[in-house]
Amino acid sequence: MKPSKGLLMVISGPSGAGKGTVCKELNKNNEFWISVSATTRSPRLGELNEINYYFLTKDEFKQRIKNKDFLEYAEVYGNYYGTPKSKVEEMLNKGIDVILEIDIQGALKVKECYPEGVFIFILPPSMGELKKRIINRKSETPESFMTRFKSAYKEINYVSKYNYAVVNDVVENAVNKIKSIIVAEKCRVDRIKDSILDSKEGLIHEQFYD
């Protein structure tokens, strides 16, 4: 049987929807490889370089763009974000499932070059709850809060570009829905047809010589 390629899952949604929390809980047993993005924004309290992000200067980031080192990159709120390409491809080719927790602009760029990926949009239970979550971060000025909150209204319109939408009301419920999506995707015939054909040939061989 041919080795199967890993599943690429792209998870995104508006700021404050809880993407990071959902991904962390989803991978608490280290079943997946979560890609570490690069960014030019400053670290938030408690964030570590090469763990939460690769923190780069804008000059460093632009040089990597020239070197075509990113699977995707985008400018969001005045800072650059990007997904290093080589490690993602390495993991997928090893048969390891990969999660990209990236912004909407980046997700749509990945979809252009990797349409067989699984694109999941995380939604807040309400705009009121989204507002509360952003405020509770205590990392925004009044001006940046308004920018993020207004952007959230626009970003939610992109949900139709994704394969699945999951409401993050209770983290455990959201995680269980995503796990169900993964199981379903791994049973799709177009993903496993080569394995099915190999299995069929093996069964025919056994029957012929039985």
Image (spheres, rainbow, N blue to C red):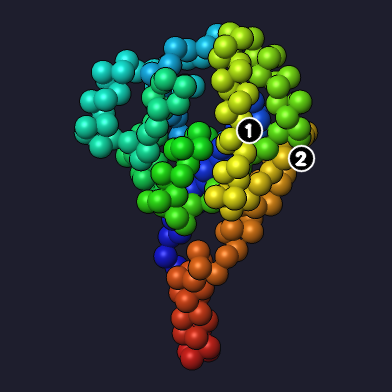
Mark 1: give few (<14), some (14-19) or many (20+) Cα within 10 Å.
few
- Residue receiving disc 1: 153
- Quadrant of the image containing the N terminus: bottom left
Image coordinates of residue 83 in percent, x first then y, are 39, 34
Left/right of residue 168 with respect to residue 35 in the rendered view: right
- The residue type indicated by label 1 comes to Tyr
Q: CA distance from mark 1 to mark 2?
A: 24 Å
Left/right of residue 155 with respect to residue 65 in the rendered view: right
Camera-nearest label, 1 or 2:
1
Q: Is residue 139 visible?
A: no
148 vs 192, nearest the viewer: 148
201 vs 131, nearest the viewer: 131
- Residue receiving disc 2: 173
- Which quadrant of the view contains residue 142? top right
Which residue is at a point 26% across and 25% down the rendered structure image? 62
- Which quadrant of the view contains residue 26? top right
Circle 1 sits in a helix, a strand or a loop, which is it?
helix
Image coordinates of residue 68 in percent, x first then y, are 25, 37
Circle 2 sits in a helix, a strand or a loop, which is it?
helix
Mark 2: give few (<14), some (14-19) or many (20+) Cα within 10 Å.
some
Q: In the figure, 38 relative to 29: above or below?
A: above
Which residue is at a point 45% across and 55% down the rendered structure image? 115
